[in-house]
Amino acid sequence: MMKIEVLGPGCPRCEQLLANVKTAAAEVNVEIAIEKVSEPMEIAKRGVLMTPGLVIEGKVVSSGRIPEKEEITGWLTNAEQG
C-alpha cells in the first residue's frame, strides 16, 4: 500500500487535490493510504511553504498548486515501480 500525504489546512484547494489523488489511484489500480496533514508545523517539517502539498512515499512531489489527475497518475505509477 502506497502512503500519500495531502498537506494543507483543509481548504477547497486541498479537497480538490485529495479528489484528484483518489481518482488517479483508482485509474491506475494502486492501493493507497491517505493521510491529511493540517498542522502548520508538520507541513513546514516536510519543506512545504505553500499549500496544498502532496507527498508520495515520503517525497514531496507538489506544493502550492493542484496537479492535474494525469500528472498524479504518472507520479503514482513511477512510485509503484520504485
Image (cartoon, grey):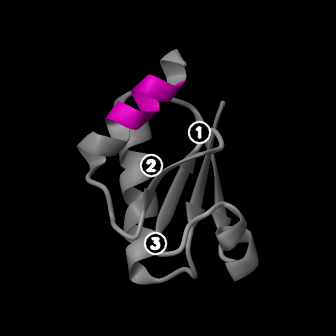
Residue at screen point 29% across, 48% down: 69
Q: Estimate the x, y position of residue 80 in percent, counting from the top left.
A: 52, 22
- Quadrant assignment, res 57: top right
Whether label 2 touches label 1, CB < 8 Å: yes
Circle 2 packing at 10 Å, graded few (<14), some (14-19), many (20+), is some
Looking at the rendered structure, the kind of residue marked 2 is Lys
Please give the count of numbered marks on the rendered protein.
3
User: Is 73 on the left-hand or right-hand side of 59?
Assistant: left
Say if the magenta span includes residue 76: yes
Q: Estimate the x, y position of residue 15 in percent, counting from the top left.
A: 44, 71
User: Is 46 on the left-hand or right-hand side of 74?
Assistant: right
Q: Which residue is mark 1?
A: 32
Overall secondary structure of the magenta section: helix
Location of the C terminus by quadrant is top right
Judged by depth in the image, the label closer to the viewer, 2 or 3, is 3
Residue at screen point 74% across, 77% down: 41
Q: Which residue is mark 3?
A: 14
Tell me how far mark 2 sits from mark 3, CA to CA: 12 Å
